[in-house]
Image (tube, rainbow, N blue to C red):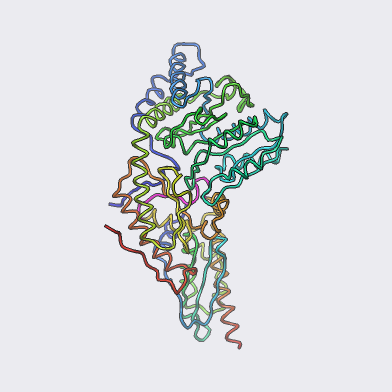
Amino acid sequence: MQKKIYFDHAATTPVDRRVLEKMLPYFTENFGNPNSQHAFGRETVAAVDAARDEIASLIGAKPSEIYFTSGGTEADNWALRGAAQALAHKGKHLIVSAVEHPAMIATAKDLAKKGFEVTFAEVDEYGKADLAKLERAIRPDTTFIGVMTANNEVGTIQPVAEISAMARARGIVFFTDAVQAVGALKTDVKLPAVDMLSFSGHKFYGPKGIGVLYVRAGLRIDRLVTGGHQERGMRGGTTNVPAVVGIAEALRIATEELDRNAAYVASLRDRFISRVLREIPYVKLNGHPKDRLPANANFSFRYIEGESLLYSLDLAGVAVSSGSACSSGSLEPSHVLLAMGVPEGLAHGSIRFSFGKDNTPEEVDYAVDRLKEIVVKLRALSPLFPKELKNEVYPKED
Amino acid sequence: MYTQKVMDAFQNPKNVGEIENYDGMGMIGSEACGDIMQVFIKVKDGVIEDAKFKTFGCAAAIATSSTATEMIKGMTVDEALEVTNKKVIEVLGGLPPQKIHCSVLAEQAIRAAIEDYKNRASK
């Protein structure tokens, strides 16, 4: 039988059965609109309130600081646009890191067309924000700094505590996109203190189409969707009750099982990374060697283009990603790798492997074995592979 | 997003490699753009007897390289100049819009190889 191995958990995860069970009644018997005055409505109000309370307590926030959105991209858009606009009277300079998710980069570019000035803060070769350069980028009219907790492509964990302190000391709003971090790293909005934080349900075995924006009490940002009084008038639209119930349950489970799952997933990642580095020549591990998400391994395979590698692995039953899933339709190499100074040729050859709690060491070994065959085959096809080199891979060490 | 024919040609590409005593060679593309194709042809009495290629690029680039080199084998060099990327795409049953430029690469590499052949022959 054809194997089907899923190594793309940074793109999305399957819904945990326990989460699904909790959600199901809210599609059928408890279907009421939380805005309705009658018993059907009251039942779902209670469920949404309980979910909000649960999420708040899990991340060290107050329930009134939790806003439900359609996902991470919406929450990122809202944080940046909402804060930029609300604070425009104080200044119009925004700083976001050069390796942010396109949800931030594209929004910042859009704001740049609308009278704001944006600095894309530089990162080092591992994708970490350069604190000295970031500090120098700050101006008297800077109102917003946005740096993600951990990168979606290369998994590098950012020095959020330092950046947050830098922003706070100057009265600048600090936002962190924690979409990749929640479920993998302990998340507490007080440690380090952040003004806003976003995450998305489907990255930690919850449903798609639901995300959260935490906004610190006292911070006013512009509303996102007008026309309804949901989310305290800030984001109109009938509440997606099953998804709200689902993201709360997924976060509860992810938090409870975080230590065990993170350690297990990291062991799979380390097995994968060490085998690839030892057995396949001319590869580069992208991202920080130590400060990286437990699930993430990102490699550039020299002389090979990433998409052909992705499809070859797919045909062998191994699902991975080249660049980020959102940009895989584009032909540009990853903006993250380019910001890290990876040459364009190598950036075109990058593949992200992201592991999950249901993966096994046997799957890791199977994938490495297939990867070795594919690399040799594609290098034999490549006009870039130097004739003086031997196109070979090395046996597994016992 | 790819047709079965594209995936087949990508998975089992024909004419992979180099021709040692080639009569024409063309190389198009750049590493920075993410695709490079190199074509070698062997010509006898104006007919392309053999064609081989090496490609750094996506699945579409490899599939069109394989198909285009298959198509020009047995053609006269002038017939081969008529092999456009449209004809290659037709044989493959279509390509996604953002991958059309990969098929242009094959057409250009073949033209470059034929040009190289003609330059050598006229010397």
B63 lies above or below A100 = below
Q: Which percent across, then down, holds residue A138?
A: 67, 39
- Is residue A324 a member of the stretch shown in magenta? yes
B21 lies above or below A19 = below
Q: Which percent across, then down, holds residue A376?
A: 39, 65
Q: What residue is drawn where x is 45% and y is 43%?
A: A11
Q: Nearer the viewer, residue A211 or B42?
A: A211
- The number of numbered badges drawn on the structure is 0
Q: Nearer the viewer, residue B109 or B27?
A: B27
The C terminus of chain A sits in image quarter: bottom left
Q: What residue is drawn where x is 43% and y is 66%?
A: A379
Location of residue A98 (image quadrant)? top right
- Is residue A245 a member of the stretch shown in magenta? no
Q: Which percent across, then down, holds residue A327?
A: 53, 48
Q: Which percent across, then down, holds residue A249?
A: 39, 27
**Magenta residue span:** A316-328
